Image (cartoon, grey):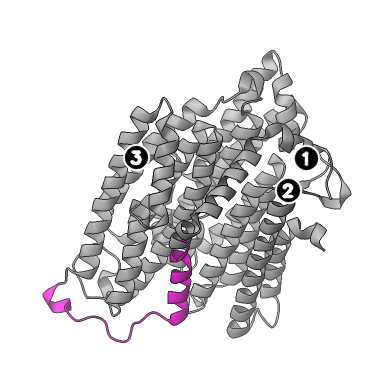
Amino acid sequence: MIQHLASWPILLPMLAGIILLLPPCGKSIPIRRVASVVMALLNTFVSALLLWQVFQSGIIVYAIGGWQAPFGIVLVADLVSVLLVLLTSFLGLAVTVYSCMGDDEKGGFFHPLVHFLVLGVNGAFLTGDLFNLFVFFEVLLIASYSLLMHDGDKHKTRSAIQYVSLNLIGSSVFLIALGILYGVLGTLNIADMAQKVSQLQGDDVYLAKIGGLLLLVVFALKGALLPLHLWLPNTYASAMPVVAALFAIMTKVGVYAMLRVYTVIFGDEAGQLAHMAQPWLWGLAVATIIVGSIGVVAAQDLRKLTANLVIVSVGTLVALVALQNINATAALLYYLVHSTLVCAALFLVADLIAHQRGKVADRLAPGRGVAQPYLLGTCFIIAALAVVGMPPLSGFVGKIWILKTTLDSEKALLFWPVYLLASFALLVALSRAGTTLFWERKHQDSEPTEGVKAHPLQVTAIIALLVCSPLLVIFGGAVSEYMIAAATQLHDITGGINTVLGGGL
């Protein structure tokens, strides 16, 4: 069965979603919870096993039905994709465990939808062609539509309508872009497109450029890149925190698509279309960091503050995509893992704070004290220090790596001031938030809420996410070596083409 390992991170969530819809899981909440956690744990283990296998043996190309690329559908498990698959599976596990303490009862089909969303995200990371990237985008989006309405009210409905409308428009543009590229290149297999794009001449070059830039619009919408980011703060802030924590990986799918398409297809070996998106990516990335930082400072509650932190992380990641070199991609992968886990943890911490502060919830205003100030305060401080980039946590390593990578770039004079000022803004905003949430109290609300304490499983899920930050530092040597190896493999376009088009399992 090892030869089919690349398909398991897709098949297992699909199987889990189906099982959880059927009796006895579909009717018994305790059985459903146990089955969901077990399947999420199994998927995480399989994802880790796949990462180890790819690290030891090289890229795995899985040809579905035995049809070889470029004619058949292939899954491509390389060091980049399997890293993100493991990240998604682990995040799905943490969210599943956290939700078992009552959040999953606030709406129907929570657990199946979580597994279907993980299925869509993992498929998007593993697919070897753009059409199936579109298919997996739709799978994860359909699941996210329903999860967004979990425990719904009128505010969630308004955000959901905006979210669904924008993504339907994005899906239409995606199909148009794919149609143009297929008409010009005669293929949508990523490796085959990378091989053929440099051979284009005449009007075909301009048509391919139009298709490529339309894809940029789609990926910018999915990743919440300025000016297509306006849907994210309200959407993430209105969703249940456990859902928003899972959504922390979704913007990274858009960033991954940019990285894959504009490094492999329109990268160094694309002839006249080489690096065609780079000028757009760089300017929009810097603007996104600025706008996201302003949103963080202006946020009136912890969930919206965290949602704007996601926007800042997207801008940072896209700036690294625009640099188009191995060191920048390695720094991108490290920062992507760090930011996803920390932002997810912050959403969950915000949920516990909101439950323990009564009517004030997680608003940044004086109110009732929390029932577990030392526990929640410690979790908040660790997450805040990691986000800002203070030692000895992973945010500091990521920030130094990013600054070092951009130092030799001609854009350093613009990026460094923006990035450092954004970090300072985040420090101010998070310091203010922590002070307000844990120290400032109204006189009549001076006593903490009694009896509203976090369940040990909820705390375990948060700690599991937060402990990854120091672990990324403790095992920094091995982690950085992996990131550099993954980036080198991604930028080896000729080697990747030969591996994918040379055969599959």
Mark 3: amino acid: Tyr
Mark 1: amino acid: Thr
In the rendered image, is residue 244 in sight?
no
Residue at image position (62%, 56%) is 85
Residue 419 - label: 3
* Lower position in the chain sequence, tag 3 or tag 2: 2
* Lower position in the chain sequence, tag 2 or tag 1: 2
The vertical placement of 179 against 22, above or below, is above
In the rendered image, is residue 305 in sight?
yes
Residue annotated with mark 1: 499
CB contact under 8 Å: marks 2 and 1:
yes
Few, some or many C-alpha atoms within 10 Å of disc 2 (few <14, some 14-19, many ≥20)?
A: some
- Which SS class for mark 1? helix
The vertical placement of 156 against 75, above or below, is below
Residue 71 x %, y %:
84, 39
The vertical placement of 173 against 167, above or below, is above
Which span of residues is magenta-colored?
Answer: 442-468
Residue 145 x %, y %:
54, 58
Residue at image position (41%, 24%) is 410
Residue annotated with mark 2: 58
Residue 226 - label: none
